[in-house]
Image (spheres, coloured by chain):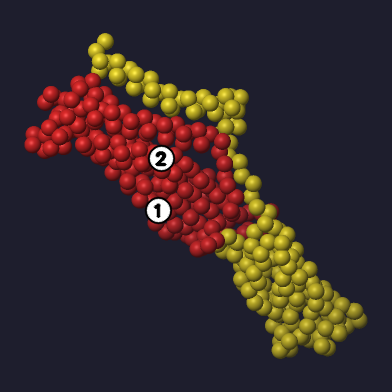
Chain colours: A red, B yellow
Amino acid sequence: MGIIRALSLNYRVNLLGLASALLLFYTALSNKPWWTMTGGTVGEQTFLAEVSPFNIVVEILGKPVEVPILPYLNLAARLSILLAAAMIFIGSLLAMRAWSKPLMNIRGLLLPIFFLAGLYFGLSLAGSYVGVSLPLAGESTLEYMIHSGEFKIATETPVVAAFTQEYWLALAAGIVSVLGKAVHGKIVKTK
Amino acid sequence: MSKSGVVKAVLLLLSLVVVVAPILYALNLYEWNIQALVAPSYSPPKVDFRLEPVGVKFEGGELVAAFKLTNLGEVKVVFEDLDAIAYGPDGKALAPAVLGKTVTLPQNSVETLDLKISVDDAALNKLVSYLEGQKSVNIEVRGEASIRVFGSEVTAPISVSFKIGSADIGR
């Protein structure tokens, strides 16, 4: 129980919860992408995708691809995580109260997991629709054939995909929030 | 209801509101037209260029056909390579044709593109025979062009033609 006592400043505040809340606030307020994919060579991009649950930018040949509902879904995700962070923050400050337990949540961990699953599903769907294999991470060359009447136009595009530091930070925030919730249960039980 | 129960109920309600409210707002904005809300919109940039023959000359055993290349599109196009064959007016292959040099064509610009056709004695004799009794004949160049557009390598079929006269061979 020594560790729990230390992590809660003698069962008063949930420090792990506070840390996860601050990380989640940063994650939700940041517009930086969690995952990027660029096609083309340096300085000349055939396409660009910068994706996070809070902001999605897709450009093909320098022109944006827009889906009207996406900004609203991004807003819903942002508000949801801000609410989750606020709940954890308040719950962590009021750790000595029994009713603070429901405030601790693991939404911060679920989002990076669902993001990864959604990305995998989205890339598989887009890949099968276009007939190419889009990487989740790493480098590859997209070979695509355009049939125009009797002609065939072959295109070759180098592609680089990667998870950014923001994604790993969000995942870390989620893991810390789970630890915070576990510690919170012990703090409330002790009280 | 206990304090914990009240907190749980309030949180559930708030969580539901923050997710549902933006979606309801979007639906209301698009007058509940779900198709309009989820349909992606994209206007690709115009890719268009025009090739016009401007002249023919003999240079170091090669027939050089110059073309005025106009980029009418919205993207920069780089002509990097050409793997083509020049055909005579009878449709028979005359000689291989290559690109004189890489041509970089920014949007709304005009450049000269040179096609170099290696003419050996046999091809030259063929050309002379085509021109017998003719003022000029049409030579068609067909093949594949390697073009770079926005960092992608594109191999596309190309077909251009130009006229050649006796005077051009004599030069």
What residue is pinned by disc 1?
A162
Mark toward the start of the polypeptide (1 vs 2): 2
Q: Which mark's residue is nearer the viewer, 1 or 2?
A: 2
Taking the spot 43% from the left edge, 27% from the top edge, the residue there is: B19
Taking the spot 66% from the left edge, 64% from the top edge, the residue there is: B106
Q: Name the spot of residue B80 as percent of width and height, x first.
A: 61, 71
Number of numbered discs visible in the structure rendering: 2
Do the residues under discs 1 and 2 have CB atoms within 8 angstroms? no
Q: Check if mark 1 and mark 2 are on a common chain.
A: yes
State left or right for residue B91 relative to residue A144. right
Q: Name the spot of residue A131 as percent of width and height, x first.
A: 52, 49
State left or right for residue A185 relative to residue B122. left
Q: Which mark is residue A91?
A: none
> Depth check: B37 or A28 in front?
A28
In this view, the residue farthest toward the left is: A2
- The answer to whether residue A55 is visible is yes
> Depth check: A159 or A45 in front?
A45
Q: Dot 1 surroundings within 10 Å: few (below 14), some, or many (20 or more)? A: some
Quarter of the image holding residue B52?
bottom right
Name the secondary structure under disc 1.
strand
Q: The residue marked by circle 1 belongs to what chain?
A: A
Q: Is residue A136 above or below residue A53?
A: below
Q: Name the spot of residue B171 as percent of width and height, x first.
A: 82, 88
Q: Which mark is residue A29?
A: 2
Q: Is residue A40 above or below residue A19?
A: below
> Depth check: B162 or A101 in front?
A101
Q: Is residue A148 above or below residue B16?
A: below
Say which amino acid is labelled 2.
Leu
State left or right for residue B128 relative to residue B37. right
Taking the spot 55% from the left edge, 61% from the top edge, the residue there is: A44
Q: The residue marked by circle 2 belongs to what chain?
A: A
